[in-house]
Structure formats: structure tokens, C-alpha cells
Amino acid sequence: MALTIGIGMELTASERSYMNSEDVAVFYPSGYEAARHEPSPIFMNELKSVGDVPAEWNLRPEFSTSDGKSVARIPVGKGVDFYGNGEVSGPLRRNGREVRFWNTDAPKYEADEGRRLYQSHPWVMGIRQDGTAFGVIADNTWKSSVSLDEDIVFESEGPAFRVIVIEKESPAEVLRALADLTGHIEMPPLWALGYQQCRWSYFPDTRVKEIADSLRINRIPSDVIWMDIDYMDNFKIFTFDKEKFPDPIGLNDYLHDRNFKAVYMIDPGIKVEEGYRVDDQGPAADYWVKDASGKPYVGEVWPGPCHFPDFTRPEVREWWGTLYKDYMATGIDGVWNDMNEPAIFNVETSTMPEDNRHLGGDGLAPGPHLRYHNVYGYNMVKASRDGILAANPDKRPFVLTRSNFLGGHRYAATWTGDNASDPALMKMSIPMTINLGLSGQPFNGPDIGGFFDDCTPELLAQWTSMGVYFPFVRNHSAAGTRSQEPWAFGPETLESCRTAINRRYRLLPYIYTLFREAYEDGMPVMRPLFFADVKDPSLRSEQEAFLLGGDLMVVPRWSETTARPSGEWNKIVLEDTPDDGFQANLYQRPGSIIPVAELSQNTTEYNTDRLTLLVNLDPEGKAARRIYEDAGDGFEFRDGEYADYTVTASTEGNEVTVKLSQTEGNLKKGPKSLRVGFVTPTGIKYTPWTKGDTVVFKKM
Ligand code: GLC
């Protein structure tokens, strides 16, 4: 049934709908053309019906067309707080905001007044006052937008699209359902959770070695050095500059000998140049994106005029993957895919024309850039990941991407693009990272210290002191700005950065377990404070204090907010050195146990042989936690080579018993010595080290 409600506007109820699983409903507009949307990049499996949508189902989209645009309006009722929406600038709570889904190179997040960034996640999570929650997906890659006033309104320049609605009892359950639909992240290699040092660019190779040596000499725990574009010969991807990087194998060996991993950048633009191996391979096989007239499209990026692989085509993705074989064989450990919106220089739109052509394949229809733009980066990292895995089948691939789409967390981690050394952008990185986590992408973080402009000693100390609790921890800065390494601002800043990064490494047993949880059920690593009590309205807008996992509250030192969850969240200080005035304040949830390792300088040295268990009892004198461990790389964990421990604390009278036991997995690694740090309102009291798996101590 259609209802004409204004000139050029027609409103229709959903033409077809079904339940895809319990609590997940799918609604189709009339005139839906599957070939213009499917196969969807979002879902692991094509959506299927398991039954009818029950009559009492609450959230139902109304489909319409307006001024040639396809619209889906989802009336949600009053009192709903909105979150998610992917990579967004601005506040945590998204009410009253509009986001445009058109992946864009957005320096300092200024494009379109902050409404357009590098990635698109047509996804919104809503939380009602009673804590029940829902999620809405617009299954649509075409250029579009969403506005979040009273209702959720998606508007697309493409054909009518279907809408998926998840209804659950809590936001955590909504995220689990999202992960069931869109897939889970892969377990990252442990080294990718360490501290990482980057700059545009460290060159020549002697400079890279100097940075590695400085990290070790200054005792900054660290795992990764990043190679930005200047390692290449004239910015030609999959090449090395003969003068600046004459011996990549030697360089990577040097880094590996010092327990560093090496991550190198690969952009999508391929320099148009006869005789350049990668560009030469394109024409015969017809690999490039075409312009409207059918000729290979040429756009300018770093190397000058470039061709762009048409990643919608399976054979192009396959070919792209093969390029990584010899490249990774030089000892490269991870890959940084940048500029993949795709960003194009010297054009007003900063990207390709909307009528460029993509050929698709494997069931995906040919279509214009208007349809495939938002998944250009997504398809690129999918191909990269497959290629890297084929090159090194026994290692967990690590890909970092700037552009992506809802569902792309399956292939790559992300960073939030080109921010600046600006306290306001440091603060904004908290809601950005949280909202990405609330959109299915748990593994992300900002450029610590800021990309553009000169950092200051205070800002680097502040940013590092909170940035170490983000899922992804990398210091990065732009060419032409002042040096931004922890030692670049003198001994005091160095000391603050070191203290913060030491804390990161000591918390790795906890953080690695959080990544395991993200892998299992889509739980974000970094969470909004309201996850501590979703029914407490005072927490819903808190975006300075945040949670790392469920048990650790991080309050940046500069924060002036006071909204806090109830209960005795006791402060924990992990070192006995004097306070520097920069370190974030950490508070532990009542009823929790946080495992803390001895300090290591990198994840190769890291181990849990001596493990401190920080115990903050609940009012009943109890606490519990899971700890997960495996080899930190490779895939043996899938065959049972892992260890899952349960730690419990219970109290009888004045006596507390803390017990660790392996509950799952064949890996026999386990802590050899344990001690308990009893967390009290006045500080942590440590027991002596013990060899057994049980620690008993008196409360006073
Ligand atoms: C882009 C990236 C930035 C990188 C630069 C040079 O601006 O976002 O991280 O350093 O390109 O490759």
C-alpha cells in the first residue's frame, strides 16, 4: 500500500519482512532490487527468514522516496540515546547529529563540518531509559546519510534499501547480535597490542635503526616501527627506494633482532609508468577502475597520475593478494593501507567521479562509483588480508586501514585518520574510539600526540598517559612537524610517556583477554562509562572517563567531569614512583580481579610467569575474572593450544582466598608465581609471592 504525502514523496510500509533470528528483523521496501545491493558486504551470510515478524514488534521502518532519494525512517519514540554510527567526530551521544556516508580524506575532521570521515558505518544503536537497546542497519553502500533527531532517518542517492533491526535487553546484547550478523574480529597478533612508533616518515633506513635504538636505550617498551611512504621508490607501491632503503631484508632483520616488528605502508594508487612492474600488469588483465567512457581512470596521488585497482572484482583482489608474496618475504610483519577512500589530489571532491565504473563479479553486479565508493577501502583490505595470509600462512595478518565500511573489522584494524596536535582533538579521540567500538570495530585508536601541527611536551604527556588504554596505541606525526617521539621533549616528558607505556605492558594479560572477548562475541575493548550501569542516566553522556574492558575505569588527568558509576571503584596505582601529574587515574570495579604482569620491554619478552592479581572485593567479599593466554601469534589456539583461567576470590570472616585454575585449553603455560594486590580505598596491599595457585591472606 502506498500513500502519497507530498509532491514527489511516497510513503510505503515495508513490503516484505521476516525474522532473521530471534530479535533480528529484516524489512524490505517496495521495489527492492537485490542485484543493486547484494551480496551485502556487511553480513557474514546472506540474510534468511526464520519466520514472520511478530505483530507486537516495535520498530518498523517506513520507506519512501523524496526528491529522487530513497528514504527509510525508523520512528523510535521518545527518550532514546543514540550511539555508534561508526567513525564520527563530535560527541559520544549522537542525538541531533547527521552523518554523511561518503568516505572522505578529512584532515582534522573538517570536511563537511565534520559530517564526513574516512569510513562509513550505516549503523545506529539506540538505548532507552530503562536500559533496553536496539540497533539499526541500513544495508546500503550507496552515497547516503543518516540523521538522528527524534527518529532515525537514512537517505540514499541509490535505490531503495532494506533495513535490519535488532532488539535486545541491553547494549552489550545488541553488540553481540551485531557481531553474529557481521562477523568477529580475528585474534590480532599480541605484538599489535604493544606500543608503536610512527612518523611520516622515518628515512633513510639508518634513521629507522636510530629510532629503534632510541626506544630501547630510553627503555620505552615498544613493539613496532612504521614505514610511511618515503621507503618507496618514487611512491611506487611494492618497491623500495634504492638509496634510502637499499637493503629491506637487512633492515627488517635489524629490527627483529631487537624484538621489533616492521609495518610498511601500501596505498591503492599505482603510478602510471611504463616499465613499472605493478602498473604493467594492469592493462592486459584489465584490472583498473574505469571512467564513464570505459577507459582506465587516472587520478593523482603521491606518485602523480595513478591507476586504481577495481577491488570489486574477485580476480583483481586475487592478483592484489599475490603482490604481497615477495614483499612480505623481505621480513615485513604488517601492512598499513592508507588513502583508500580512495583519496585523489587536485579535484574538488577529493575522490573519483561518481560515474566511474566498477565491474564486480562473483554475483556482484557492475555498478558506478556511487555504489562502490564506500567499500573501496573495505574491498582493498579484504584483498590485502587474504594476500598476507597466503604469504605467511602461519602468522596472524595485521592490516591497518584508514578507510572501511561496516563489517570491515573482519579484515583490518583502523586508526582515526589525520587529527592534529590539539587538546580538543585529543579529547575527541575518546568518543571516536568508543563509537567505533559500538559499531563493531573494537580495534582502533588515534594518532597519539596528534598528526598535523607541532605537539607540545604537555600534550604528548597527556595524550600518551591516556592513549595507552586505547585498543590501538601508536604515536604518529606529519612531515614538517616537530619530532614527536617520547624523548623529543626532554627528560620529564620522556618519563611520563615511559610510566604510561609501562602500565600498558603490565596490563597486557588483561588487555589480551579483552581482545579474546572481542574475537568471541564482539564486545568492545574500550567502552563508554554507561556500560558500568546502563540504567544510570547520569553516565549516558560521559565521554572523558571511559572503561577499558568491564573492570577498569580510566579518568584522564585533565578530565573535569564527575559522572561515575556507583559502588566502590577503588583507585589503583601501578608504580611507586612519584606522581607526575599526567598519568590517568585508574579505578577498579568492585567484584573484579585485574591480572598484572611484570614489566617487559616488548611482547617477545612479555610473559605471565609472575602474575599479580589485583583484587577489589564486592560487598559480599567476592571477585572473579577470566584470563586468556595463547602463543600470541599463529593459529594453534584454534586447535586447543590456549589456556583459559578462572580466578576467584572469596571471603570467610577476615580471610580471603584467591584461587587460579585452568578451566580450558591444552596450553600449559600458567603463572609460576602469584601474589595478590588487595585493593582498598587507601591503596593496594601486596601479599608475598607464592608458587602455588592459591593465595590466602587476612583483610587487615
Ligand atoms: C595520509 C595518512 C597519514 C600518512 C600520510 C603520508 O595523510 O593519513 O597517516 O602519514 O598520508 O603517507
Image (cartoon, grey):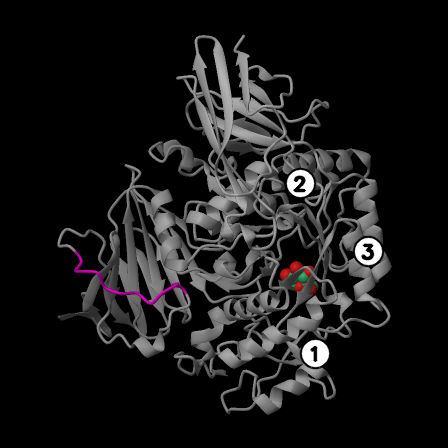
Please tell me whether residue 199 belongs to the stretch shown in magenta.
Answer: no
The chief SS type of the magenta part is loop
> Is residue 346 something that shows in the picture?
no
Which amino acid lies under the numbered mark 1 shown in the image of this protein? Answer: Gly
In front of the other: label 2 or label 1? 2
Residue 422, percent from left and from top: 64, 47
Is residue 438 shown above or below 626?
Answer: below
Q: Which residue is mark 3?
A: 254
Span highlighted in magenta in the image:
42-53
Q: Quadrant of ligand 1?
A: bottom right
Disc on the earlier residue, 3 or 1: 3
- Secondary structure found at label 2: helix
Q: Are marks 2 and 3 in contact (CB under 8 Å)?
A: no
Q: Are marks 2 and 1 in contact (CB under 8 Å)?
A: no
If the image is split into quadrants, where does the C terminus sit?
Answer: top right
Q: Which residue is mark 2?
A: 464
- For the residues marked 2 and 1, what is the alpha-carbon distance in whole angstroms? 36 Å
Residue 202, percent from left and from top: 78, 58
Quarter assignment of residue 585:
top right
Residue toward you, 304 or 617: 617
